Structures are given as C-alpha cells and as structure tokens.
Amino acid sequence: MSKVNRNFKAGVFSHLFGDEENERGLYDAFSPVKQSENAEVVDLTLEDILYMDRINDLAFSVGGTLVCFFEAQSTINDNIAVRHLMYCGRVYEKMVDNKSLYSSQRVAIATPEFYVLYTGIAQFPEKKVYRLSDSFAFAPCGDIPLELVVTAYNINKGYNEDLVKKNDILYGYVVFIATVRENERQGMNREKAVREAIRECIKLGYLVEYLSKHGSEVVNFICQEWNWDDALAVREQESRDLEAKKWMSLVAEKDAALADRDVTLVKNAVDLADKDAALADKDATIADKDAALADKDATIADKDAEIAALNKKLNAV
C-alpha cells in the first residue's frame, strides 16, 4: 500500500486519501469506468521537492489505463480546468516514457478523469462542469483544438448524498467538515472548532482511526488551509472593492466631464442667443434707418414734384 509522503505538507483531504485503499474508494464512488477489484492503484500526486509541499491534492492511476485527478476546494475557483491541465501534463511526464514518444508507433496513454469536491460555505450547485475552452481568449473556429472537462460536486452535508455515502471514509470526511463549520457558527474559534469536531466524530464513530492517530496534524491542516482561504477571500474582496472604487472614480470623472460639457453647451447656447438678439436689434435698427431713408426719399420726391409744377407755371408766363 503506497502511503502518502508524510514529510510533505498536505491538506486533510490529500492526507486522508493518499493511500491505495482510500484512493480506490474515491475511484469506486465517482468514476463511471469500472475495473477489476485487483486493478493496481498507484499514487501520482505531485510534490514540490524544493518547498516540501504538495502541488495538487490527489492523482492516481487505476490499472494503468485510467488516471484520476481530485481537488478538494473550500473556495470557488473558475480556473480549475487550467490548473488541472497543468497537473495533467506533469503527471503524464511521470507515466510516459519520453523516448517512446519519438517512436513511429502510437503510444497509448491512460484516460484522465478530473474531479473537484467542494466543501465551502458559499452557494454552489450540486454539480457543475468546468471546461478548459471556457478560458480561451477567443472562441476557435471549427473544432476545439484542446479540451479538458472537470466535474465539480458539492459534497457538503445534504448534497450528493448518494455519491458521498458510497464511501465511508468520504462520508466521514464530510461529517467532520460539517461539524467544524457548525462549531464555528456556534462561536468557537477555528482551532477549538476543529478539536471539538475531532472529539465528536470519534465519539460518533467517524474516521476514528485516522482522527485518533493524526488529530494534531488535522488541526494544523485545517487552520493553515482555511486561514489561507480566508486570506485569499479577503484579498479577492479587497481587489473587487478596489476595482469597484476605480470604476466609480472613472464614472464620477466621466460624469463631471459630461457636466462640464453640459455647462459649456448651455453657456454657448446663451452666447448664441445673445448674439441672435444683438443681430435682431441690429436688423431692427437697419430697418428703422431704411424706413427713415424711405420717408426722406418720399419727401424729396414730393419737393421735386412741387418744383416741377412751379417751373411749369413760370414757363407758361
């Protein structure tokens, strides 16, 4: 039985399921592909030698023809398909002989399956599918050149119970996480909530052997993981708030610019109205002058007529 490397930092999920027997239990619960009970299970979970850390939560092959990838998530992450793509490439590097890839004969590789098990407190459906192509910068024309499909299951208490109850270890994990969450809701700090959950689950018969043996490690795992998730959530919220403030500032600047433009337009309209009024006054003055000139011309014409009449009388004498 291939035990998980205890020298590497792990989460409760990978620590709990990182052996052949428990990996087989996950495979039996979730995979639609059924193999013989004697099919060999080999752990392929990625580990970072430099930082003594685990890269992904769980990866293992079954019978050499199937490789399962599992991630336990307490936060929602829409990049999970891209992450699985990176995990998958590194796992296949471990499984496939590099030299054989340059042979003229096609190399058969294990069929992959990708899963996410969600245990967070945010609203999440019972089942959700993530596709790698959803992250492409633009939609390709014709066939999708590369695809990877991740199926996410909400395994919180009350969700997907038929699946969860197929495996006693998984159900015990779900009960344990739910108990920790409930203890926190009751006002306990995180460490106390975990310690009380360990005692309660052992008392009720869930994960008795594991929690009895690794209780102190579990406390550290949960506190590290969830504190980190909380920090990420706060950081994401701060980022969203900052982005919102940025857009609000831009909108305010745009509104101010539009208001200034409106003021300018109104001022221009008033100026044009003043100019039109001045032109109207000028036109009226010109009209008055034209009328005066017309009267003067009429007076001159009358005088010319009088002079002509007088001249006529003088010529007649």
Image: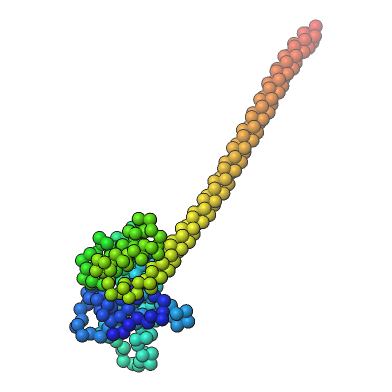
Looking at this view, is 13 or 159 the one in front? 13
Q: Position of residue 155 (x, y in %)?
A: 28, 65
| Quadrant position of the N terminus in the picture | bottom left
Say left or right for 1 vs 51.
left
Q: Residue at x 62, y 38 (%)?
A: 268
Q: Can the viewer see residue 133 in this picture?
A: no
Q: Position of residue 151 (x, y in %)?
A: 30, 69
Closest to the observer, 157 or 304: 157
* Residue for point 38% across, 58% down: 188
Q: How is the image coloured?
A: rainbow
Q: Left or right: 242 with respect to 12?
A: right
Marks counted in the figure total 0
Up the image or down, 246 lies above or below 293; here it is: below
Residue 157, quarter of picture: bottom left
* The image quarter in which residue 305 lies: top right
The answer to whether residue 239 is above or below residue 280 is: below
Camera-side residue of 242 and 160: 160
Q: Look at the image and tell me whether residue 281 can be seen.
A: yes
Q: Quadrant of residue 97?
A: bottom left
Vertical order, 14 against 191 (above or below): below
Front-most of residues 97 and 44: 44
Q: Quadrant of the C terminus?
A: top right
At horizontal 36% and vertical 62% (from top left) the residue drawn is: 193
Residue lying farthest top? 317
Above or below for 158 versus 172: above
Q: Position of residue 71 (x, y in %)?
A: 34, 72
Report whether 90 appears left or right of 39: right
Residue 69 percent coordinates (x, y): 32, 76
For image coordinates 33% across by 92% down, the residue present is 104
